[in-house]
Image: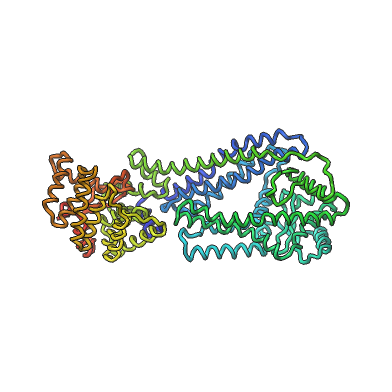
Amino acid sequence: MRIPDGVIDAAREHLASWLPWAGPAAALALATIVPLVLLPPILWPAARAARRAAGAPWQEQARRRWPLAVSTRLLAMVAAALLCFSAWEMGGPLAATGSRTTAGLGFLVALIASIAAIRLVTARLPGTPMAGPDWLRGHVALWCLMMGHVLIMAAMALVMPLHFGLGVALVLAGGALATTWWLRGGILVLPRLMGALRPADAKLAAQVERAAREQGVRGIMVFELRAPIANAFVVPAPRALVVTGALREVLDAPQLGAILAHEVAHLGESRRRIALFSSRVYAVLPLPLALPLGVQFGVWYSFYAFVPTLVLLMATRRLLRSFEEHADRHGARAQAGEGTYAHALEALHRANLLPAVIGDRRRPHPDLYDRMVAAGVQPQFERPLPPSKWMTRGTLSVGIALFGAAVIATTAGADFAARAAQAGAFDPTWALALGGGDPRVAGLLAEQFEAAGRHDAASDLGRYVAWASPDEPWAALSWACLDAPSEREVARLAAAIEGHLRRQSRQGCWQEAALAELWLLAGDYARASAARDRALALTDRADPDFAWMAAILGRLADGLGEPDRARELLATGLARRAAGAEADDPRLALELADLARRVGDADQAEALERVVEREGALQDRRGELERLRRELAGRRLGRMIAAPYVPVRPSTSQYVPVRPSTSHRTSHRTSHTAQLRPRLEPAAWRRG
């Protein structure tokens, strides 16, 4: 549920100036420190195996380095994604940057820190290029060319609404349009602006033109990319062919011509096959739907957003393999001499230290050994073993487990700080900063403000807690009963909470009962009656706590002008109390005594109040009532000063912050609220 900006701004005014920045700063610090600390020891076994292959033939070096290469790529993304979730949790409503911005910054910082940690591990490996401005520019440009659609998906996630509606449709449509623009030429814009991508020289353009003329392909744009990786690839929609400078250094002219013929063959495919190939980039667009699915229906429903992605990728997997096999045939056919294309592939793998055999049929490219044999050349080396899958899987498993544990620890740390603050063992200000605005801690601060006489600060924080706790309408009811806002504001809050509970499908008798009282305070008797009826329908009369619910529903019936139903519920509550294990509970007796006085049963009320006196075992009955008032003010999200009356749900071990009603605020109550309040508050506690 979206909290109004005015509510957040009013709460921030009473907090320390550094507090809204503490949560985002801590999240970014964790996103920096965790990858730098965890990644080196996680990657150490794979890096050690790669270093042992120094001086061996390139096939063995590539085989030993492959688990490290795969693990570094995947773990960098895993670390960024998990720490992004941690940053989301720490950047709560009261944070200066908000949850979305903090999560986006956390992802970026964690990715940069992961790359830095990976460079620390791989810097001493033979063949690793020196890092510098050109190296960084080339890798960023290559990443934009190959993974630009992932950047669009990340931007969609930053603006995706948390509930389904027109906003979700607009974000999806915008993402689809941006991806289409990226496919049809936008892919080349950013690398060209960075200076890493430029039009090819005349010599390279002539080689491409020769290969295109032989295959009957026209209208190809040729570019050269300054990147430390030897590779060539095509961009189908703008019909562009990109060649890296490192590839031209590795291959001679005949070998480069064979590789170019392979790439031109991709552009010579039919429009239908090219469209199917290009459709793979749209596979990531449904992933941002995980946000509204998880928020509206539950965390496990967010995994449904991955179903379209997996289906599309699996459906086009065979198509990619057929693309590469078809292009290999054209490359072998266009070679200047026997074995030229096969030796060009071998030189490309040697330059990039790619294994000659990977043994994974799901990859788009066949293994180098098989491609050379298919091109009519028997490799001059025996078929090597594939890279160790156990090393790759073990590294990934340990990395995911450690990063997951780190995220759980940081998330649980904020919750532990909130619980410690409730127990008085931790400063609530720091707990609120680390939790990004945890409403439990905000309630504790409101209590401190009220005790210090800062009534306006306590009121603003109480309003924030009411809006920040939509799953617990009792928090909103406590604030509405005790701070006496306008009926319009109570109605706005009740409507927002009711909409949130409907979207979340979290209908329960206790939530509906609290909603009914909220609507009653707002003066909307029709909605109050409807919520009361839903609460009664959802109530299990065999529940041991039904005596509590009977007292609450009876009070609602009295407030709605239904005395007969109130008497019926009083009788039911008394019967359930007598038959249950809470016959001597003074709080339940006090609730039923209040209902008895409402319906005019003074004898029953006095009998129940005697139970309160007897079980309290105190000489001063008024003092016992004051103590019980504090207990009745108990809620889930904070511990506050005693209140004239707050409806209570039984058997709760946590508390909701409430705003005590003070005599100096009585003049601000509306006339209707002043008339309605006596019907909601026990007569014994009503102010004179």
Q: Where is residue 332 in the image (x, y as percent from the top left)?
A: 83, 54
Q: In front: 401, or 199? A: 401
In this rendering, the answer to whether 357 lies above or below 317 is above
Q: In front: 326, or 441? A: 326
Q: Position of residue 138 (x, y in %)?
A: 69, 51
In this rendering, the answer to whether 54 lies above or below 341 is above
Residue located at (43% from left, 41% from top): 413
Image quarter where the N terminus lies is bottom left
Quadrant in the rendering for residue 678: bottom left
Display coloring: rainbow
Drawn side of residue 494 relative to residue 318, left or right: left
Q: How many marks?
A: 0
In this rendering, the answer to whether 348 lies above or below 145 is above
Image quarter where the C terminus lies is bottom left
Quick check: can you spot residue 549? yes
Q: Position of residue 566 (x, y in %)?
A: 20, 58
Drawn side of residue 75 relative to residue 101, left or right: right
Quadrant in the rendering for residue 470: bottom left
Q: In front: 431, or 79? A: 79
Residue located at (63% from left, 55% from top): 313
Quadrant in the rendering for residue 351: top right
Quick check: can you spot residue 454? no
Furthest-right residue in this view: 337
Q: Position of residue 5 (x, y in %)?
A: 40, 59
